[in-house]
Image (cartoon, rainbow, N blue to C red):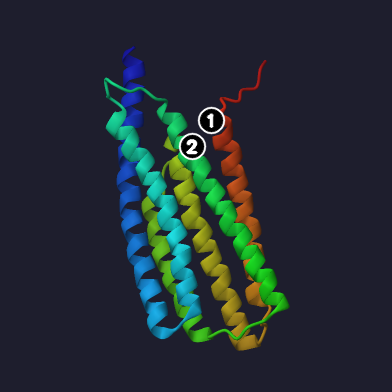
Amino acid sequence: MQHEHHHHHGHEHHHHSFEKKTQWVLMIAIATMLLEIAGGWYTRSMALIAEGWHMGTHVFAIGLTFLAYRITRKYIHSKTVSFNQEKLLSLAGFSNAIVLQIIALTVLYESIDRIIHPINIEFNEAIIVAIIGLIVNSISAKILHHDHDHSDFNIRAAYMHVLADIFTSITALCALLAAKYFHLFWADSISGIIGSIVITAWAFSLIKGSGRQLIEWKKLP
């Protein structure tokens, strides 16, 4: 019993630290989103506005993560309700993975559309946007980085959203530089397609892992 209690308390401690981490990242994401949308509107930059809305999906995802920890903490010692906290966290992770998958499909669609109907890109501002995204998400990733042994699907999903963004920021940056200096205009679309494939792979592993926990999938001997 003592061990059980200690184990439970350890979980609670990690959940509380994850809640704090997600709260910080959520605030950073909201500030960045507002800045990017306002900046994009002011400079008439589609790239900035798009990045701002993309940041909005993060706000949603990380907000969901934060909410799951907050609910867990609020009701964990409740005398009136009982629930399975691991399942709640898996459910949040599962929902986030679906959002991640939708983002991947949207990026894929837009990238293919770009190849068919190329548009002029304002390189300088797009490069600045990619750099801002990279910095903000790197800070967020540093905050959300956690010991894998103590992780759950909820924090993993939030972390993957940020990693997916870092990945897309890096590929976008390389593609924009290639387009600007070497006139490889298709590089931007290709980077989008690669990004969507990688994000799909991550989302799929999250859906599989959290889904198994939700339905208590076990291999029988």
Vertical comparison of 68 with 41: above or below = above
Q: Amino acid at mark 1?
A: Leu
Q: Amino acid at mark 2?
A: Leu
Q: Tell me which label, 1 or 2, sits earlier in the chain.
A: 2
In percent of width and height, residue 172 lies at 56, 72
| SS type, badge 1 | helix
Which residue is depicted at the point 49% across and 54% down?
161
Is residue 148 visible to us here? Answer: no
Marks 1,2: beta carbons within 8 A: yes
In percent of width and height, residue 152 lies at 45, 37
Residue 116, labelled with which disc? none
- Residue on which the image places disc 1: 214
Quarter of the figure with the C terminus? top right
- Residue on which the image places disc 2: 91
Is residue 51 visible to us here? Answer: yes
In percent of width and height, residue 28 lies at 33, 61
In percent of width and height, residue 140 lies at 39, 57
Indicate the quadrant where residue 136 lies.
bottom left
Which residue is depicted at the point 46% across and 66% down?
53
State how far apart marks 1 and 2 are (Cα).
Answer: 7 Å
Quarter of the figure with the N terminus? top left
Which residue is depicted at the point 42% across and 35% down?
150
Q: Is 136 situated left or right of 76 in this image?
A: right
| SS type, badge 2 | helix
Closest to the observer, 104 or 136: 104
